[in-house]
Each structure stands twice: as structure tokens, then as C-alpha cells.
Amino acid sequence: MTEVKQQFSLTNEAAIDALIAQMTLAEKIGQMTQAEKNSITPEDVTRYFIGSVLSGGGGNPEVNTPENWAQMVRGFQEAALKTRLSIPLIYGVDAVHGHNNVVGATIFPHNNALGAARDPDLVRRIAEATSKELMATGVHWDFAPAVSVPQDIRWGRSYEGFSENTEIVTKLGTAYVQGLQDSKPRIMASVKHYLADGGAEWGTSHPPQWITGNWQAPTGNGKIDQGDARVDEATLRRIHLPPYQAAIEAGAVNIMASFSSWQGTKMHAHRYLLTDVLKGELGFNGFLVSDWMAVYQIDRDYAVSVATAINAGLDMVMVPYDYKTFIETLTQAVQSGSVPMSRIDDAVRRILRAKFWVGVFDNPFGDDSLLAEVGSAEHRALAREAVRKSAVLLKNEDQLLPLSRNETIMVAGRGAENIGLQCGGWTIIWQGDNGAITPGTSVLGGIRKALESGAELVYSADGNFAGEELVPVGIVVVGETPYAEGMGDNERVTLLDVDKEVIARMRRRCAKLVVILLSGRPLIITDQLAQADAFIAAWWLGTEADGIADLIFGDAPFTGKLSFSWPRSIDQVPLKALQESAEPPLFPLGFGLS
């Protein structure tokens, strides 16, 4: 058994014993239930003894401000404290690159970008800043970090993984857990998605027949998201398990199960991996939470699904819409003996243990004195630092970069003045969006601020400029339209035609051309690379694109190194195909000019 960092208080264990001894079955099952804020009222939180409420992507107050977030969360917490035993709930959000549901919060680069920065201290400081913004709004639980090890960049969640490399993921995932959980007050990390969500194979994502049409099933273009990892156990343990072991050793008290399967068995039904390996072999004594309605995917018979998941080791179930049915179903399962009372008591003990540990019994409402920290100058400066450290210079012919600040620069591309596109998925709404969705500095804005007063900047999103004269330097900013999860599964992983066209158009107008790519993963850019004099992989960088201007004008050096191998063609996707290819990649893992 692994020796873990957390040392739960014996005093708290005694308090948990006393609580469990007093609790009715309804109160216990209520603690095991997590509902989404748009589907439950505070009154039902009290009535059903609900243990947790979450905001899904876009689960915002009607007027999305930090102050309204704090008020919204407080309302649910006050309802929980009105229950007979006054057990506080724990509120959860997907703050995967900052408190990204909140308008005005600092949005940091996504994890694959931070993987390119290779800086555990930076990741820890980002988690600490995020913890302050979360606590300002009363949120004690962050559904992060993802410690996926993506093996196929076609997966729409690739950007949630720090790297294709297990060692990089393990170091940075651990740093993120420590940054959240060592902060004062604490935020509980949710290490996800256990296990091998990044190892699923293309074409294995199939919605169960009985839930086709519901959005908890594989959706959109989904061909790999929620799919099946068809690897042997040695590979599973070598590539995908180490980040979880390290997170447990670092003190993780919550782990989220994956939608995906291993060798055909849904992870939410996998007793061997959830209980025998995680809770037994690795000594995890925190609690396991399900993903969004994932329990429904186990069996056509919902009662079988619920009993299977709880007996497999799930402690809290995310049932965003239909919490009443879940409560009724689990109650009947206990009464019929299909779920033993000992399993219920174990689950509740684990949940209460984490609640005592994170401090919601002592501080249920967070700290509204931290509201000034949301989107603060200090946090935005940190995000700008992260942009500088994560951008990777892929090409710099004839040392074009750094650029002069006092010459005419022509800027084009739909990503140049597009906060939403540069932030990517999981920003304000689940799938992300285009445009001015939250305050920040665009790439164009950063360039404009960096130029000297006498320099001329000419901008056109589509690259259609008046005249025909050749300009000394052109910058084109292109990238992927934001997406999340299955909606982002993409068989081709190439630039859109509109982006290819603007690069070609700018090439004809500029003596020297810089291409800045905003994306959630490596794309097939072999032809576009040949058209550029300098090429920057800037990833989905968040709200602080001043960091890109810092690099292209020489205020800071390029230090980022690729966290993913960059394929030359689609024939080198997935990673296994690249490793077996006779040709080298376009750029190997770890590449980056300085």
C-alpha cells in the first residue's frame, strides 16, 4: 500500500463516527448525490440532504459576475446548513484553466501549453491563483487537474493533458494538486479522468442504444472521446497510472472516474480498477466521484447501473438532472440488499472525511474578501508569464524574430482580435466561443501596445488590404475554433480553409511572414510551415496575449518545448503510428527554438 501525504485528523474521524451514527439512510444517500445548479433549488438541497452541487460548463448566474457567483453558491450552502445535522455541501466547478466559467476571471493557458513550459513551479502558482479566485466565489472544489496522457491528438480533450509523456504529466499534475490543496484556505482538487481516458482508440466511441440523443452520451463528431482503451494492463500501468499514484502521494482526496472504458468495461463499472487498484493497492482513502451522468451508460436497466457503480467503488454520483430518481433507486438498492449498507457507510465516511479536510465545516462560505483577486493585475501578470513560457518557436528563418518595434506591420487572421478563440474550450461556456466573451488582451492588442509611437500597424481579419505594395513584415494569427470533449474529436486535425487562404494571401503581401497558431493540439501544418519565415505554436493561451508580444519583440526569450510530438502528416496519427513511421515527425517531443 502506498504511503500517502494526507493525515486525516483523529478528531475529525471521531466526529465522522458520531455523524454517521446519527444519519438516516436518506441523509447518507443525500451526501452521495451531486446535482447541477440549474436543475435543483436550494429548497431541494435541504429536503434531500444533498452533499454537493456543481456548475457544469456555462452553469453561471443569470448575470455572470464574481459577486453574483458568490451569492449563488452561498444560497445553496445556506440551504445545506438548514438540514437536521447541518452538514455543509461542497460546491464544484470545472476550473480547468483558471476560474474559467466566470466573466472577468483570469484565464490561463490550457494544460498542453503548460506542458510546453515544463515548469512545475509555474503550474503550482497558477493553481494557487485559481484557488483564490475560486474561494472568492465560495467554491471549494475544482474538477482539475486532468492528468490524462493523450496518445491521439484527434481527441477533443487533448488540450486537457499536459503532455503525451507520462513523466511530464506526473510532475505537472502533482504540482497543480499541491497548488490547490496547499493554498490557504484549501481547494479540493479532483484528479481526472481515472483511468486511461487519453488511451482510447479512434472509432471506439459508441453511445449505448438506450441513451442515444442524450448529451451525456458520446456526441457531435465523437469518435474517440468516451471510447475504449484497448491496451494490456502493463501498458495501462506504465503510461496512464503513474500520475494518479503521484497525486495520491501528494495528498489528493478526490478522483473522478472516466467516461471511457478499458478493454470493453466502462470505468464506472470497473471494481478492479476503482476499488482493488485505487483504494486497495494505491491506498486512496479519499472519495471517488462519477462524471456527468456517466452512470447511466453502464446498463439499460438504471437500477443495475446504480448498484453496479456503487459496488464498483463510486462514492458520489454526479446526477445533474435527475437526482430524485437516483436517490430513489439507490434507496431501493440498499433496501433490497443489492448494495450493502457497509458500502454506503464507507462512501459517506470518505465524503465527510474530505469535507472536514478541505474545511467546509469551519468555513462553508468561502472568502468574499478575495473578490478583488478575481482577474487581478497580479493574476493576469502570472498568466502573461505562462504565455511567454509556453509558446514554442517552431521556425525562425534568418533570425526574423525578434521584430523591430518601429516599422510597418500588417496583421491578419481571425485569431488576431478574438479573445474567445485564443482562450479555447471551457471558457465562460462549455464549448467556448468566439469574440469578446471575457475581458483580456488579444494578440493584436498586445502587438499594438508593444509598438513604438511612430510605427504603423495595419489590420484586416481576412487579409484583404488596400493596395499592392509589399510590406516588410506580416503577422497572421490562425487557429482552431473552440471546442470541448467529443465535439472536438477531429479526424483531419488540419487548419480550416479560411486560415490556409489568409496565410497564402499574406504571403503574397509581405516580405517576411510570421504565423501564430492558436490551437488545442498540434495540427497538420507542413504546407503552411513552408510558407512562413517564422512560426509560433501559441496554443490556446488564455486572456493575456501580451505574452506573445513579449516574445516576438524580444522582451523575453522563447523557452517553450513541445509537450506533444508534431506529426508531419495524418499518417503519423495517433502517436503509435508516428512511432512506427519510417519518416521522422515534423517536430519531435521537446523541440523548441530559442
Image (cartoon, rainbow, N blue to C red):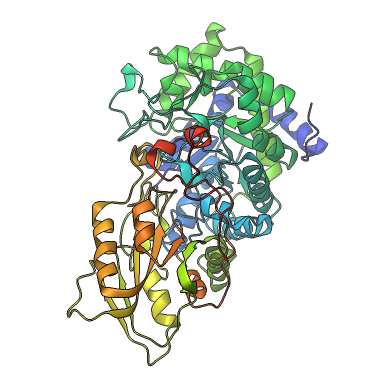
Where is residue 401? Give x, y as percent.
Answer: 48, 74
Q: Residue at x 44, y 33 (%)?
A: 292
Residue 343 vs residue 131, the one in the foreground? 131
Where is residue 185? Give x, y as percent.
Answer: 67, 55
Q: Is residue 421 visible?
A: no
Q: How many marks?
A: 0
Q: Is residue 571 visible?
A: yes
Residue 317 vs residue 355, the one in the foreground? 317
Please indicate whether residue 275 sits to the left or right of residue 438 in the image: right
584 w.r.t. 222: above or below? below
Q: Residue at x 71, y 42 (%)?
A: 357
Where is residue 542? Give x, y as percent.
Answer: 46, 61
Spot the residue most to the front. 582
130 w.r.t. 89: above or below? below
Spot the residue most to the bottom. 454
Where is residue 476? Give x, y as percent.
Answer: 33, 67
Q: Which quadrant of the figure has residue 456?
A: bottom left
| Quadrant, the C terminus | bottom right
365 w.r.t. 408: above or below? above
Q: Residue at x 41, y 16 (%)?
A: 302
Please indicate whether residue 400 sits to the left or right of residue 366 in the image: left
485 w.r.t. 540: above or below? above
| Quadrant, the N terminus | top right
